[in-house]
Every structure is written in C-alpha cells, then in structure tokens.
Image (spheres, grey):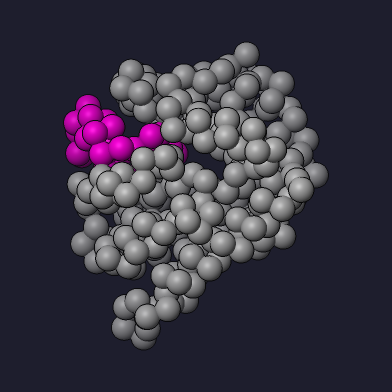
Amino acid sequence: MSGTAGGGRIERRFAELRAAGRAGLVTYLCAGDPDAETFWRILAELPAAGADVIEIGMPFTDPMADGPSIQAAALRALAAGMTLPKVLGLVRRFRELDQATPVVLMGYYNPIYRYGPERFLDDAKAAGADGLIVVDLPPEEDDELCLPALARGLCFIRLATPTTDERRLPKVLTNTSGFLYYVSMTGITGVGAAPVEQVRQAVHRIKAHTELPVAVGFGIRTPEQAAAIAKVADAAVVGSALVDTVAKGLDAAGHATAGLSQAVLGQVKALAAGVQAARS
C-alpha cells in the first residue's frame, strides 16, 4: 500500500474534507493569465469562493498535455510578462493572506530545469507552495526532482490515466504524496466529458493500491458534472472551464474587462456549491 509522505496543508485539507463528509474542489488557473494583477485578484479570493486546493499553472511555451484553452492561457501569461520567479512571488503574496489553503504548482520540467531544480525547490518551499505536478517527469526520473522535493516537505503529485493498468499503477504511486490526480479520459485537457461510472470504477481500483486521496480532473465543466464526480472521488479538479471564462472576459485587444475576475469567482462558487451538495 502506498500512503502519504510529507503532506502538511494538503494532508490536513483532505482530513478536514473527510471529517466534513464531503469531497473537495481543486481549481486550476494559469499564473499571470491574462495579466499579473487580474490573476492576483482572482487568486486572493479563490478560498472564499470555495476552492479547497489551488493549482497554479507555471506557464510554458509548449504545454504538450494541455488543450487549446490552457495553451492559450500560457501564451497570454507569458506575453504579459509572467516568469517562474514571478509565479513564486504570487505564491509568497498569497501566503501573506492565507496560511491554510494548499497551493500546488503545476507545469513542465523545462522551466524548472532552466531555473535550477534545487534552487526552484528551495524557493518554492520558502514561498509557501505545498506540492508539485510536473506532467512530463515519469517515475523513472524520480531522482531528478521528486525525491529532492519530498526531502524538502513538498508533495509530489502524479497523474494516473485510464491506460494506467495494474502493472503500471504501483510504479506511478511510488513516492507520490498529497493526492493522486486521476485523469478521467485519454487525450488533452478541455475536451470531452468525464464518464462518471468509469471514473467510479477507476477510483475504486486505485484505492485498492493506496490510501492517498484521489482527485479527478479533465472534462469537468459544470456544477452538475463536478457534483457527479464528487460523489465518487475525493475531489473534483476544474481547469479548462475556468480558463475559458478568463478568455471570454477579454476585450478585442486581449485585455481584461471589468467583470472578468468576478465572473471566474462566481463560476468557482457555483462549482463549489455543486461539490459540497453532492453527498448531502
């Protein structure tokens, strides 16, 4: 059985959710999309809107696992001047407001490698990050980033997919901590809808191998879909749907309109209500 390692805020948050008898809502937005200040206004209010865990995307020019929505978000953020040091600065600023909500940094290894892996881990920990999702580093490369992250008390969260079979799953779970992110369908983010019965069976299968919470993402766009997933998993992850709302809130020049941040936060509130009502 694979358990938790490290944990901290993430472990506490999932313990609180279990005690409350409900699943959690994990939100994803790309840092600096569409600009640093608009992103900050959203980030600062996400806990009050109902986000239980916050994933912050580290923008990269070639996000190969992401669909058009998140690819566009990364390019908008980079064009607006977002950098990895600035992402960590946003986390540090968030921690001045909120010491309880877990923050997970999600992205690709190239920017981390360029930053310097050891320096990045030290700076991410010091800023107040709780975990990492680095989608292009497989378990076979654990010495590169995973083990040094765990040594610093940062969770290393891995993804499992419908094609992760019984032979591969124990390898995926090795050194995974915080939670396991189950990708509910094959392919890229933002396309299709999560098949709930298949998700239920997959979560049951995964839990035979681990005590880690299982968060399910890809294809969750509405409060109803989030509620359906919340009935069978420990958390529902919503990303592309929120990123699409950011995109819809841009004017013809690509700048944020006055109502953009409130539109995203309103969407999070509706998703959180769906998740919280799922087991009531």
Residue occupying the far right of the picture: 197
Magenta residues? Answer: 108-136
Q: Residue at x 41, y 70 (%)?
A: 261
> Which image quarter is the N terminus in?
top right
Relative to residue 37, is residue 259 drawn left or right?
right
Residue 64 seen from this side: no
Percent coordinates x, y for residue 111 in the rendering: 26, 43
Task: Return the residue nearer the eye: 94 or 248.
Answer: 94
Quarter holding residue 121: top left
Q: Residue at x 45, y 47 (%)?
A: 54
In the image, residue 128 above or below residue 25: above
Q: Is residue 240 magenta?
A: no
Relative to residue 190, is residue 206 drawn left or right?
right
In the image, residue 210 above or below residue 258: above
Q: Residue at x 69, y 25 (%)?
A: 207
> Could you tell me how many numbered marks the image carries?
0
Relative to residue 18, is residue 59 drawn left or right?
left
Relative to residue 247, is residue 52 drawn left or right?
right
Residue 280 seen from this side: yes
Percent coordinates x, y for residue 85 in the rendering: 20, 46
Percent coordinates x, y for residue 266 in the rendering: 53, 68
Q: Is residue 129 magenta?
A: yes
In the image, residue 48 above or below residue 234: below
Percent coordinates x, y for residue 225 in the rendering: 70, 57
**For the stretch drawn in magenta, what is the main secondary structure?**
helix
Q: Residue at x 51, y 51 (%)?
A: 51
Residue occupying the far bottom of the picture: 252
Residue occupying the far top of the picture: 1
